[in-house]
Amino acid sequence: MVSRKTIARMSLYRRLLISLRDAGTTHVFSHQLAKLAGLTAAQVRRDFMAIGYSGSPTRGYEVGKCIESIGGFLDGPRRQDVALVGAGKLGRSIIAHFSGRRPKLAIVAAFDNDPAKIDTRVGGCRCFAMEILESTVRDLGIQIAILTTPPAAAQDATDALVRAGIRSIVSFAATPLHVPEAVCVIDMDITAALETAAYIAREAPAAEVAEVEVEAETDKVAAPLMRQLDTLLAGGEVRLDELARCIGAQIISGEACPQRIVEKIYAGDRVSDLLNEASDRTLLVTNLMSLQMIRVAELMDVPAICFVNGASPEPEIVAKADSAGTTLLVSPIGVFETCGRIYQSLAPTTAPAVTTPAGA
């Protein structure tokens, strides 16, 4: 089963490639597409390998064929119909935005409890009464739904959709939904996204100043050590639990995945650098104990994060890591000492002493 993150990246690639095609671009290299997508070239190549598409070393990916290949992966053989529940302003905007964009996906029925909307057409889509939602969805063979109801009505609407046979729900309702295990719910919480953006806009300047103050000093030690670690890790498959033992770290989340392979160490707190360096075999060693770091790790498929100095993460951070499938470790020592222990365990006969900058 392909992960949701991979599917989301494929959808992003297709949108970007369509824009390139419309602008007259015929070929694109992985690093160019990665820059547009905010990912790494290695991630792009891995994703395309997963769908059996490869480019030319001299010309890159052929844009038209790449779009076709992604379409063969994302789109089913027949059109899939979608129901929208809640034909208010947001629901109508979604119908208008999506109309005609994907031939293999179509919003064919809307549902609302407003008598003024029932039996009318909303953005070209017929609006039905909520009372006949179950029978209509079942009769039309719909398996996908978009939920744009107020939070108070969301669970009742979800229950009706599940009884009607819906298998996937995209929810804008901004409330947790309880569904059977076989039903997929994808939450689109605009409020949480906006509040996250507001927090970062408010707090980021101070964090950037702090990073600049220590960056020149720490890079003198960090950059050479990271290169040496990458060289040693490239020599063989090193398991996460083996690294945890050599660090003396405690695994506090994701204990079911101790045998994950690590091929790269990234030590630092700069999210922008992590986005460029990370892969699905990267161990992140960081001082930054926050939900944002867990979200970034999930986005980049980073399998594990090692917090340092013996600090225990808050329960909400552990819960988010569990839901994201991210293994959390806690090292009893600092960032550079942790990396030094890894280095010494991988090259015990040649490892030099690792010094730590003052204040690190």
Image (cartoon, rainbow, N blue to C red):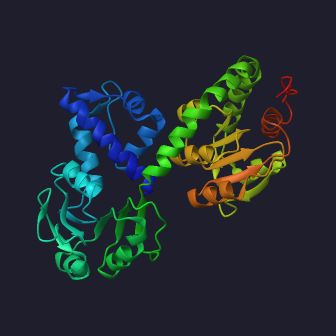
Which residue is drawn at the image coordinates 53% and 44% (left, top)?
196
Q: Residue at x 72, y 22 (%)?
A: 224
Spot the residue most to the front.
116
Q: Is residue 345 above or below residue 25?
A: below
Q: Is 177 on the left-hand or right-hand side of 54?
A: right
Q: Is residue 292 left or right of residue 244?
A: left
Nearer to me, 107 or 198? 198
Q: Decide: is 1 above or below 47.
A: below
Query: At x 21% / y 32%, what residue is drawn?
Result: 21
Task: Indicate whether 331 appears above or below 212.
Answer: below
Quadrant containing the C terminus in the rendered view? top right
Q: Position of residue 63 (x, y in %)?
A: 25, 34
Residue 111 visible? The answer is yes
Q: Nearer the viewer, residue 328 or 125?
A: 125
Give the residue at x 66% y 29%.
207
Q: Quadrant of residue 121?
A: bottom left
Q: Nearer the viewer, residue 109 or 44?
A: 109
How many numbered marks does the figure carry? 0
Residue 317, image quadrant: bottom right
Counting from the top left corner in percent of width and height, residue 72 is at 25, 52
- In this view, the residue in front, 73 or 11, is 11
**How far across and down, in percent of the image, does residue 110 sit?**
21, 66
Does any portion of residue 271 appear in the rendered image?
Answer: no
- The part of the image, by quadrant, that contains residue 253 is bottom right
Q: Quadrant of the N terminus?
A: bottom left
Residue 71 shown left or right of residue 30 in the figure:
left
